[in-house]
Amino acid sequence: MSPHYKLEISAVTDPGVKRANNEDSIGMEASLGLAVVADGMGGYEGGEVASALAVQTILNELSERIELLRKQHAEADSGEYSIQSLAVRDVIKKSNEIIYNAARNEPQYQGMGTTVVLALFYDNRLTIAHVGDSRLYRLRDDRLELITVDHTLMQQLIQRGFYTAQEARESLNKNLVIRALGTDPEVEVDIQEDIALPGDIYLLCSDGLNDMIDDGEIYLTLKRYNDNLDLAATELVKQANKKGGKDNVSVILARPVKTGSATLGWIEKVTDWFF
Amino acid sequence: MPAKLILTLNGANVSEHELSKETITIGRRPENDIQVDNLAVSGKHAQIITILNDSFLEDLNSTNGTYVNGSLIKKHALKHGDVIGVGKHQLKYINENAGSDDAFEKTMIIRPDAAGMPEATGAHDIGKSVAKIAAQEAKQRGAAPVQGGAAARLQILNGANAGKEIELSKALTTIGKPGTQVAAITRRPQGYFIIHVEGGSGNQTPVINGKNIGTQATGLKDHDIIEVAGVKMEFFLPS
């Protein structure tokens, strides 16, 4: 985060009602402006291992990379992606390698994999990265927006016109993930960059949330507990569990908050094209 | 047991076909997996894609159309007992496994060569059909913003810089006049979106085709006219 902003973060992860263990992992570091959710799957205990490996690798590697960028006073360059986005992509690919190798070398981890969704805030921007069906939503000015596009068979079928979003919610096959960390030696990471405005609320979650409650319920909860992120996160998980809690459910809420008065400075710094 | 189709004409069984391949074609010509030799049926009439336990029917722009339970369809996710109509023939979809197991409630990863896939389904085929669906989907979407591919661009229409172009080759491009109005254009998997950043003292938000979009991220279409800080620009998708 820039000196003029800080990030408020609240997080909850819960095994849900029906499962004994929690295969989700979450990680966050407000000073780095970083939040990560991973939803592991496959193998005996492999799911937990895969998601934990992803979060740990990303947190460790990315803190190093960001420290380095700060020391070098590196500026966002003019390439296709910001240097922060490139660092994010690198560390996610690295975590993929680590999980893939573990899954190959240890029989008990065979077939394990994990999704990941990550948000990294810097200056007035954020980088959003994801693989699989964990999601990032944003609440801005009274509207909840889903920013990531699930890497699921169902999403592909919706885009192809075989299903409407509503039919998809009722379908059996909605949980077929077509991209994950740890299942192949290489992975393609979806990277987006966006502008973060003070007061936005960013929600990172595993599918245990959005399979149990719909976007309307998420919106209402974020609105109602807008002034208390801790309460909002707890309440989201509580509602998912009340609706059945069939899966592990993880929620991270992050809100950029203005601390200084200087706004023009950063806007000038980041504007690519002046009129 | 794989799902199957029973072909009938005027209530009499003609033949049975197992849906054991990823793609089954239906049509009048002999090269179809299910040949229906009748002039009311197009040469290549329809196809069925099967993934794991589910089958998807798609009309291939046939002359007389494809029906499911009496309704004309283009695309349809088949359910056990559905009756498909092509010309005067009917195909009944039988899938006794559908909906009977909740093994999929747990999230699964599917990919080519996946270990631990249900044996009968042929993991390799699934990977292929997914890749195929993805490829077709990308083609349909047309100007999808492929990473590293050709970029969309903006052309300024008025003022001192009229005619000037900017390539939207970055994941995020900010444009405007700091202190007056700034907007950003971000590239998402679904396309390009414009976002309000700051609106100066008058709290101006971007205008698209004469309409104020407020503070919400808004998808851009080819030839949209964008107005930021009094400057008009036309948006072009990569050709």
Image (tube, rainbow, N blue to C red):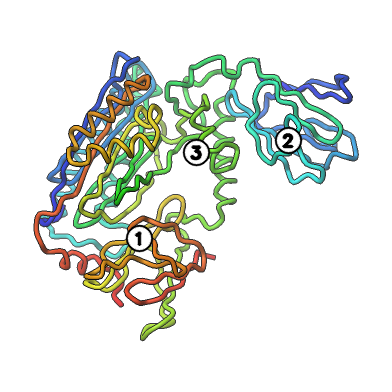
Q: Which residue is mark 3?
A: A155
Task: Look at the numbered disc 3 and give the secondary structure of its residue.
Answer: helix
**In the picture, residue A240 is in which quadrant?**
top left
- Placement of B45 over or under A2, stated as above or below: above
Q: Amino acid at mark 1?
A: Gly
Q: Which residue is mark 2?
A: B71
Q: Which residue is mark 1?
A: B214
Mark 2 and mark 3: span between their CA atoms?
A: 25 Å
Residue B9 in view in this figure: yes
- Placement of B124 over or under B100, stated as above or below: below
The chain holding disc 2 is B
Q: Amino acid at mark 3?
A: Gln
Residue A89 in view in this figure: no
The chain holding disc 3 is A
Residue B31 percent location from the top left of the image: 81, 37
In contact (CB < 8 Å): disc 2 and disc 3: no
The number of numbered discs placed on residues in the rendered structure image is: 3
Task: Look at the numbered disc 1 and give the secondary structure of its residue.
Answer: loop
Residue B68 percent location from the top left of the image: 73, 32
Do the residues marked 1 and 2 share a common chain? Answer: yes
Task: Look at the numbered disc 2 and give the secondary structure of its residue.
Answer: strand
Residue pictured at 42% horizontal, 69% vertical: B226
Disc nearest the viewer among 3 and 1: 1
Do the residues marked 2 and 3 share a common chain? Answer: no
